[in-house]
Image: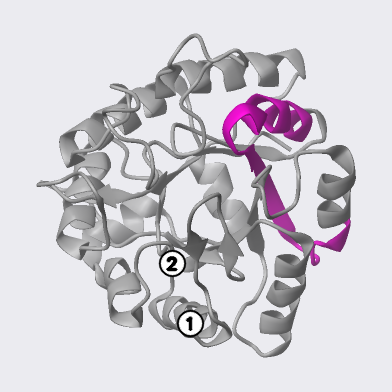
Amino acid sequence: MNVILNFTPTGMIPTKEMTPHVPITPTEIIENVHEAVEIGITTVHLHARDKQNGKPTYQGEIYSEIIAGIRQFASDLVICVSLSGRDFHEFEKRVEPLALQGNIKPDMGSLTLSSLNFNKVTSTNSPKMIQALAQEMKYRGILPELEVFDVGMINYAKYLERKGMLQPPYYFNFILGNIACAQADLLHMGIMLNDLPPRSFWSAGGVGDFQLKVNSVAIASGGGVRVGLEDNIWYDFNRTKLTRNADLIHRIHTLAQANERAIMSSAEFRKLLNLKVGDGHYGRIS
């Protein structure tokens, strides 16, 4: 199977003070995605930022501006919006990007399958919240991007399947190397792969210094990758060079070519996940 390249350009943590290369404004994010599409990606995982202070935001109007801009040049690109519980805890806020309609409707929404601790903050995802988000996406015809930081989260996905809140095919994102979760090693990754339910497709990304290591193992193992400044702002292990998103994507292409694998197109990804054709379902912006 070809490599699913899940591009994560912004995230919630990187700031301009940390790196000048992180895209913050809608225009910057759109331009980064445009460059990424020209290089070759499968899907994009979007976070929006407040226009005044650059902090993460849930506001649908900012997501709509970003998605509309992307669909001007990539009408079939699979677009996922973040529904993160790190900064926003109210269902009404977290669900707002899912309400976008027509040409700016997202294909997917992120669904983290448990609460977890990062270095300094907690991402809160109660069972009630997870189930409500899953049901909202099912109602709206939006596919969950299942974010798993540990093996127990995969087990919870199977629980939701038994309850009728999730149904295959599934797309899982492994995020490895966080201090309180599964680590970036073969044993942790292998256990998680072994536990995936049938008809699952997956990508793997590493936090910080682990990004290249995890991406390399994922490609060699037949999986996809999650890559971008959301998870890592450095190009090298010694942290001497701040990276651009384009640099990270070019490196994934080099790794894929070395393993004699091509990057999966959005059209192929849509077919695997039974997503509607972007251009036919959403239409073009005039």
Q: Nearer the viewer, residue 63 or 121?
A: 121
Residue 105 in the image: x percent, y percent? 29, 62
At 15% across and 46% down in the image, what residue appears? 53
Residue 187 in the image: x percent, y percent? 90, 45
Residue 226 in the image: x percent, y percent? 57, 39
Q: Which mark is residue 85?
A: 2
> Viewed as shown, does residue 29 lie left or right of 235?
left
Callout 1: helix, strand or loop? helix
Quadrant housing residue 206: top right
Callout 2: helix, strand or loop? loop
Residue type at numbered disc 1? Met
In contact (CB < 8 Å): disc 1 and disc 2: yes
The relative height of residue 97 versus residue 248 in the rendered view (above or below) is below
Q: Report how far apart the C-alphas of labels 1 and 2 lie in the structure.
A: 9 Å
The relative height of residue 82 versus residue 124 in the rendered view (above or below) is above
> Viewed as shown, does residue 104 lie left or right of 229?
left
Q: Which residue is mark 1?
A: 129
Q: Is residue 154 visible?
A: yes
Residue 228 in the image: x percent, y percent? 48, 32
**Magenta segment, which residues?**
194-219
Q: Is residue 154 covered in magenta?
A: no
